[in-house]
Image (cartoon, coloured by chain):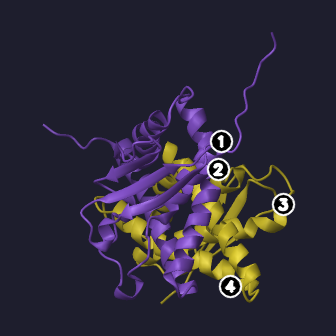
Amino acid sequence: MSRPSGRKQDNHKISRELFVLTYGALVAQLCKDYEKDEDVNTCLDRMGYDIGIRLIEDFLARSAVKKCRSYSETAEMIAQVAFKMYLGVTPSVSCCSAAGNEFSLILDQNPLVDFVEELPAERASLCYCNLLCGVIRGALEMVHLAAEVTFLQDKLKGDAVTEIGIIFLKKTEEKKHKRNK
Amino acid sequence: MADEALFLLLHNEMVAGLYRAAEQGEGENGRCITKLENMGFRVGQGLIERFTKDTARFKDELDIMKFICKDFWTTVFKKQIDNLRTNHQGIYVLQDNKFRLLMQMSAGKQYLEHAPKYLAFTCGLIRGGLSNLGIKSIVTAEVSTMPACKFQVMIQKM
């Protein structure tokens, strides 16, 4: 016997749909305001960055995770904890470089594009989910990790999967805090 | 629960981003509120469709307004409208004493002049929701002391 799982489940789903719909409305508005795709992408990235620098605090408060000891741990944290918490999906992580500072997150399911069928023809180079890149970049910067985050593959543009690439850049300063003896 | 933070941040960033663009561009300030309201309208339309897929038919206008105050508001803002008043002639006033989008801003009169920007999207949300339930309306908002605010809905007879 299956009873409806209750309003709570639906409310959670609708809460997420509110976010997805709002994001869609935002992208549509930006497309109206800016002619060039690059401008829209830059704008989305910038907004994502501003959101990311604030979101990290919310994330750290909710998850109470310990400090990550390596880049790969950080990437795993982003994929398994952060994405799961905010978007309800868990991308898979793979390391792309021998130096151990390039990673890619592969998303089979991207909730942000739930209501998007395809990009309009005149907007072929629009990175619809560019906000995500900005969010990750901003959040990492607030924990003193400089990174470059870009979309390597995008399902909306015809690729097989959606792939986000994170390249950790060298830290500009290394502070060793020596607490009181 | 984590979704609230996301939506809140996105909403605030949208307002900030639009105004930033307007400053750098032609400086048409009034357009920003309209843009935000239109975005809210579109989202409201979509959201109410998803929401009312399985609910029973609404008996009348008042029933619809009660739905907006209770179920709709609870899902979107995690609480119900505190007070609904009507003159039974097509004007409804929805009062929310602790409006979530203003909670973080101030608890009094500080930043009062900025409040309308943050209410425009929600006005559109209500207008869009009502529109897809067959009601044409005009929605405005007013704030006298944050975080309490009132949304006034004027039903337009078609």
Secondary structure of the residue carrying tag 3 is: loop
Kindly identify which chain the residue marked by label 1 belongs to: A
Is circle 1 on the same chain as circle 2?
Answer: yes
Q: Would you call the spot at circle 3 few (<14 residues within 10 Å), some (14-19), or many (20 or more)?
A: few
Could you say which disc has been placed on residue A53 in the image?
A: 2
Is circle 4 on the same chain as circle 3?
Answer: yes
Cα–Cα span, label 2 and label 3: 23 Å
Kindly identify which chain the residue marked by label 2 belongs to: A
- Which residue is denoted by mark 4 in the rendering? B31
**Residue B94, located in which quarter of the rendered image?**
bottom right
Q: Name which residue type carries label 1.
A: His
Q: Would you call the spot at circle 1 few (<14 residues within 10 Å), some (14-19), or many (20 or more)?
A: few
Cα–Cα span, label 1 and label 2: 11 Å
The answer to whether residue B127 of the structure is visible from this angle is: no
Q: Which residue is at a point 55% across and 25% down the rendered structure image?
A: A66
Secondary structure of the residue carrying tag 2 is: helix
Q: Name which residue type carries label 3.
A: Tyr
